[in-house]
Every structure is written in C-alpha cells, then in structure tokens.
Image (tube, rainbow, N blue to C red):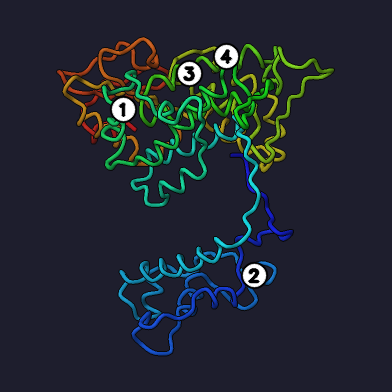
Amino acid sequence: YSSLDADSEGEEGKFYVWTADEIRAALEDKPGFFEKPGLSRYDFFAAAYGVTERGNWEGKTVLQRALDDASLAARFQLDPEAVPVKLAECHEKLLAVRGGRVRPGTDDKILTAWNGLMLAAFAEAARTLRSDEFIRQDDLNKHCVESETPGSDEFIRRDDSSAFPRSDDFNRLGTTEVVTTWHKAATRNAEFLLTVLRPDGKLRRSWRDGKTTDEVFLEDYAALILGLLELYQTDFNNRWFSSALELAGEMIQRFSDPVGGFFDTPADGESLLVRPKDLQDNATPSGNALAVEALLKLSALTGRGDFRDLAEAALRPAADPAVRYPTAFGRWLSAAEFALAEVKQVAIVVSEDGQDSARELVNAVRAAYRPNVVVAAALHPIKENAPELLRERPPVDGKSAAYVCEGFVCRRPVTTPDELKKLL
C-alpha cells in the first residue's frame, strides 16, 4: 500500500508515542521480574529506551533504544541472555495496549513506482541479510496485497528460466542461510506488478480495488526496472531480467527526449502544452535519475552502448544543478558515481555438477559491500533470455567458473572464492 496517515484521532503520532505514565500503567510490575527488590519493570524499560517524564517529542516519547543489551545487563546485574527475554515481555504488554488505540488510516492504492523501490529494497535484503528474524510472516501478510484474480499462489509460481532447475535453489546459490521471507516478499511484489499493473502489456501507474488507472509516468517504469534488476541479481531468474529489458525498450520509446533525458509523461499520453521534465529529487527520487541508473546497469549486463549513451546524455543537464544543490540531487549523484566508476561485471557460469561451488562464488561477491559490481549467473548451456554477459563463457574443466570483466573485456576465469575476491 502507499502510506499511513500521520495522525489518528486528530493528533499526529498518537498511535505510536507514549507518556511515561502510559508506559508505567502498561508495565505493571510482575513478581519475580527482578530477583533484587526495588527494581521495577518500568525502570528497566525506561533505561532501555531512554524514557523520561519530559519525553523526546512534544511531551511524549518516540521509543528508540538508548542502551544495548550488554549495557542493560551490566546496569541491572542480569545475565546477558535474559535481557532480550525481559524486553520481549515488555514489548508484548505495550503492543497489547497499542492494539486498543485507533489506528491511522491507510491509503490503500498501490503505486508502481513506490513498489518498484520497495522491490529493490527487499531483493537486496534477501541477498544481504543472513536472517529473517526481523520480520514475522504474519506481519508481512498484513502489509502485502493478495489479489483474488489471479490468486496469491500464482504470484509465487515457479519459473524454470532461473539459474537452477528449482526455484528454491536461490537459497542454495545466493546465501549461506535460507532467507525465505525477504525473497518471497520481493517475488510477490514483482509478480503483482508485472501481472496486475501490466494487464494488457502496457504498464499502469496505480491499482486499487481491482482497478488500474490508464496513466503512467517515467518514475513507474524506471523504479520497476531497477527493482527487477535487483531481484535478478538475487535469484538469477531470467524472467526478471528479460522483463526489465522489455520495459526499458518501452520506456525509451514512450518517454525519451531527443535532446537528452526523459520526459515525465509518455508521448502517447494526455496531450499537454509542455511535457514536464523534473530533474530534482522530491519525496521520491527523480524519474530521470532512476532511468539513468537503470540504463547504466542494463548496459553493464548486456553490453549495449545505446543504453549507456542515453544515460550519459541524460546526466549532462543534471551535472550543474547537482553540484550546486547536492541535497536535492542525491539520486543523480548516485547514478553519476556508477557512471564514472570502473564497474566490474561478474559472470558466474554453473556447471552441471557445480551448484555448490557456484554458491560459494556468489557468496564471495556478496561478502563485502560492492555497489559498482553487477552479477549474472546461469546454468550452462546459457538460455536465450539470459544476459549477454554470460554468452560464450563456458565452465572450466567441468567446474563452475567466474569471469570478472570491465567493459565486457574479461580476465581469465577463476573457480575458487579466494581467486574471485582477489579480482574484485
């Protein structure tokens, strides 16, 4: 969904903030919570979250951790393992009280651009975070839309075009542990956007109550393309890559400006006296900046110079204002950094019996923060809808191999994680 209201019952933040007295009432003391007398559950929680009588926001408190578990254990003379258990008891009490409050209203329309950004975030989380303990499945379900047509099962259907025969091989290839929650959220998001918000093959801006709007903007295309590319680099399902490539062609055809960059509205959309082209980031990143980043990454995966030419032409008019007002052009600076960097392209070709070693090669790439690296992976022989980066790169002596390239000029392939890390 798009957003939650900032206020409820006419007060901003009322659902989320607490007075010290409200916390005391919720955390009525429990016998045996502390072995030593004179210590209260409120004192413990207040220390953990920095709660004071004055509060930290208009006389109330926005709860933020002030002390870590080790510091709490030392202050209250507790076994360190007991701290999260005791905090969990407090959290349950407070959640029960908050559950009785009036919730903020929800704007339940689904916007393609915003979901594209969310898709990228979940896809990155799936390959980066080593645990899904931070989000419960029921919490995920509360905030994800289930459409009756098609059914939710269709949104996680299996596609045999991924790097491995079974979709759950994503977990074996991409991470050292199974991280199903993040990947499932990203996959459901991508399926919904590609199916429900592209009903007749043409992307739409928004969906609500089973209906889509006819309008669409540059940011919708660009954000979705970026999200799909992040998801491809997470599970190496060729469907995400080929969809991103197809959408990029549509974006160029419908939005490109002959003098450079992109208009915010499509050429085949509503007739306007002047088609807008907003370069500045606002509440969300500039559609032009997102489009530049998407084209640069597609160029790195495909070797297509026309994508890079379009991206560089769009960057030029943003250069001067980005230098003068950098805080308003943050996404442009990110795109410019990627354009100027020596981007490394990693092609991992998986041999028939080399799935375990391929997983180790992928984990070697992901072992450090590498923002200027793009990765493609597939079983050999390479399928038609795979990125061009994988073409004519065979396994080595029957082993899975990694090719590290710059500008599609590749070094000799390597077969071990240590060799790969040295090249990166």
Which x, y percent locates residue 158? Answer: 35, 24
Q: Within 10 angstroms of label 4, few (less than 14), some, or many (20 or more) residues?
A: few
The residue wearing badge 2 is 60
Asked whether, in this view, residue 355 is left or right of residue 345, the answer is: left
* Mark 2 vs 4, N-terminal side: 2
Find the distance from the CA under tag 2 to the CA under tag 4.
50 Å
The residue wearing badge 1 is 167
Find the distance from the CA under tag 2 to the CA under tag 3.
48 Å
* Mark 1 vs 2, N-terminal side: 2
Q: Is residue 344 above or below residue 247?
A: below
Q: In front: mark 4 or mark 3? A: 4
Find the distance from the CA under tag 1 to the CA under tag 3.
18 Å
Instruction: In the displayed orientation, state which residue is furthest to the bottom.
Output: 37
Q: In front: mark 2 or mark 4? A: 4
| Residue 315 appears in the picture as rendered | no
Asked whether, in this view, residue 76 is left or right of residue 100, the answer is: left
